[in-house]
Image: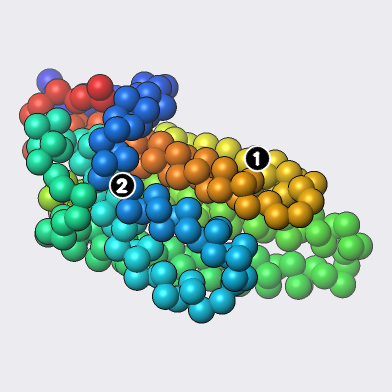
Amino acid sequence: MNTHNDNALKPLPVIQILTVSLRLPFENAATIFRLGWPYLIVALLLPVLATQMGNSAFNIVLLPFVIATSVLAGVACHRIFLCPQEEVKQLSTFRWASSEADFFVAGLKLIFALIVGLLLTVGLGSMIVNIFDTQLVPTEVYFGYNLAEWAGMLVFGYVFSRISFILPGAAVGRYFNFNTSWAATKPYALRLFFVISFLPILLATIVNRFTTTMMSDVSGNPLGLQLAISVLSIVGAVIELCILSKSFEWVTSQMPEEHQEPTTE
């Protein structure tokens, strides 16, 4: 019997990946902070400056720092979740090696691909709504926009879950392009979509509605609440990176060229 074919039929262990991904970021919090504190400072500066100065040119000034520190933090998180501890201990906070350069390029490719897909989806959704605009009452128009928005987000999320392996691949020095990522994720497409995209989108929507309501109820300077929301968003992003890392680890362990047992611990 062909072992590889049997492996390809194994379902993605969604519960195991989610459980591990909720645990590992907190178990490795000290290491994540050691390697990611520059991004944390920049991310927390944004709401402070926005409150004190308003949305102005400082966003452009800080943009290079946001990009550089997010690359360093992203690579660090993926390596923490995927590489041996001895290797992670050798990482310095400030570094720029091939992993960071490859991760930066992979991120640009992913952003460009998703922006193009998003524009096409939004354009199609607007076209559909405009076609039926004259036949719908305002409530139905609003519902139509919401429906188009959610449809776009789901398409966006599905594509992202299929091509996002280029990020952890770049972080650990294993080359993945869109084609190889799409092919590797094909046997597990629906479960990967659920764990990488649908669940985070659903939770982010709920949290966003909740925080928006809280912001509208806060009088005066809501800086403290904005900082709390920023910290919560960062924690959520780290958990999402862990989900992506552990999904990548499990799927690549099932590929024919891999001979080691899958590890999610």
Mark 2 / mark 1, whichever is N-terminal? 2
Residue 92: x %, y % from top left:
15, 48
Q: Is residue 106 visible?
A: no
Are dots 2 and 1 in contact, CB under 8 Å? Answer: no
Residue 195: x %, y % from top left:
44, 35
Viewer-side label of 2, 1: 2
**Pointer 2: what residue?**
36
**As shown in the figure, which amino acid type bears the numbered disc 2?**
Gly
Task: Examine the rendered structure and indicate whether residue 66 appears above or below residue 206.
Answer: below
In the image shown, does 257 or 76 lie closer to the viewer?
76
Identity of the residue drawn at 46% across and 49% down: 158
Identity of the residue drawn at 89% across and 63% down: 138
- Which residue is situated farthest in the right direction here? 137
Question: How many other residues sit within 10 Å of disc 2, few (<14), some (14-19) or many (≥20)?
Answer: many
Q: Label 2 vs label 1: CA separation?
A: 27 Å
**As shown in the figure, which amino acid type bears the numbered disc 1?**
Ile
Q: Secondary structure at mark 2?
A: helix
Identify the image quadrant of the C terminus: top left
Identify the image quadrant of the N terminus: top left
In the image shown, does 193 or 170 lie closer to the viewer?
170
In the image shown, does 222 or 145 lie closer to the viewer?
222
Q: Secondary structure at mark 1?
A: helix
Task: Examine the rendered structure and indicate whether residue 175 appears above or below residue 56.
Answer: above
User: Taking 169 as reference, is 185 left or right?
Assistant: right
**Pointer 1: what residue?**
206
User: Taking 245 as reference, is 51 left or right?
Assistant: right
Identity of the residue drawn at 34% across and 36% down: 242
In the image shown, does 242 or 91 lie closer to the viewer?
91
Task: Examine the rendered structure and indicate whether residue 129 appears above or below residue 22.
Answer: below
User: Taking 20 as reference, is 235 left or right?
Assistant: right
Task: Examine the rendered structure and indicate whether residue 135 appears above or below residue 43.
Answer: below
Point out which mark residue 224 bears. none
